[in-house]
């Protein structure tokens, strides 16, 4: 009913037993079901708390992380972890239709939602596009910068979603337990002409993210 807000503690088992006149076993079973549904979480030695609602992401079209956050009433921010030129690994070269070892630019950022660590973004750009980023403020939306400063047209994107076990280094960055499930979104983005200029791998916390799909009518 919304009486308890996000991150607010639930009453103790004893308080709930007295309030509802039910057994401890019933309380614990109810708690178990709520934890399974992702509505509450138990912090050992501290208590049980309401879990904030998951952040909804649209998978249709080309939408920046910053825009999704702002439309949800959430303040986005970013920490740049890496910005460098490098030789394209095989899988990146294949995606961007480049020769293996062709020079590309990697941008790795940690993305925040209201100061909460939510996603790790690894974006690989063709050299002629990526070299422009060395003079830009990458704590802000890169897509907005492409559109407003350089007047690039974002024409289309191809996306895949996969659930994986988080890498140890990513678990540390996202401040989640080792072996946690994460949602990996791979994006291939096209600007103007029909060739890809960005290949990105975004690693989202699965406990804080839900993806929304839109489809047409069935034939």
Image (tube, rainbow, N blue to C red):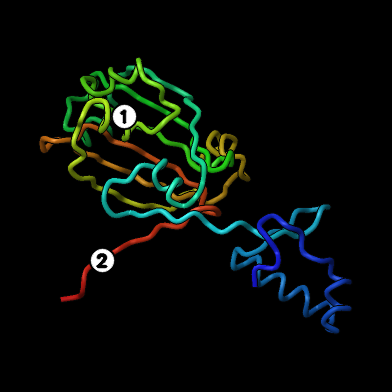
177 sits to left or right of 204: right
Residue 89 vertical position relative to residue 30 in the rendered view, above or below = above
As drawn, 41 above or below 191 = below
For the point 38% across and 60% down, the residue is 212
The relative height of residue 216 versus residue 172 in the rendered view (above or below) is below
**Mark positioned earlier in the residue sequence (1 or 2):** 1
Can you identify the residue that label 1 sits on? 145
Q: Where residue 156 appears, x then y in whole percent? A: 20, 45
| Residue 120: image location, x then y, percent | 47, 37
Q: 163 and 46: which one is in front?
A: 46
Residue 98: quadrant of the picture: top left
Q: What element carries label 2?
A: loop
The residue mark sitting in front, 1 or 2, is 1
- Left or right: residue 37 versus residue 87 is right
Q: Where is residue 151 in the image (x, y as percent from the top left)?
A: 20, 30
Q: Residue 215 carries which label?
A: 2
Q: Which mark is residue 79?
A: none
Give the spatial CA distance, label 1 vs label 2.
30 Å
């Amino acid at each position: 009913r919304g009486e308890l807000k996000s991150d607010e503690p639930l009453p103790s088992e004893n308080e709930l037993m007295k309030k509802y006149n039910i057994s401890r076993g019933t309380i614990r079973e109810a708690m178990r079901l709520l934890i399974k549904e992702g509505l509450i979480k138990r912090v050992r030695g501290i208590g049980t708390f309401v879990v904030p609602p998951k952040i909804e992401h649209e998978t249709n079209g080309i939408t920046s992380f910053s825009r999704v956050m702002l439309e949800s009433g959430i303040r986005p921010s970013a920490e740049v972890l890496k910005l460098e030129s490098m030789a394209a690994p095989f899988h990146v070269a294949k995606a961007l239709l480049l020769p293996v070892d062709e020079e590309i630019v990697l941008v790795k950022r940690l993305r925040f939602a209201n100061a909460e660590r939510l996603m790790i973004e690894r974006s690989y750009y063709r050299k002629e596009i990526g070299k422009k980023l060395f003079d830009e403020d990458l704590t802000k939306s890169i897509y907005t910068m492409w559109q407003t400063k350089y007047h690039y047209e974002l024409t289309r994107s191809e996306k895949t979603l996969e659930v994986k076990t988080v890498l140890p280094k990513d678990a540390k960055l996202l401040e989640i337990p080792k072996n946690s499930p994460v949602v990996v979104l791979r994006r291939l983005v096209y600007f103007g002409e029909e060739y890809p200029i960005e290949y990105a791998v975004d690693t989202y916390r699965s406990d804080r993210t839900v993806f929304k799909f839109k489809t047409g009518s069935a034939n």
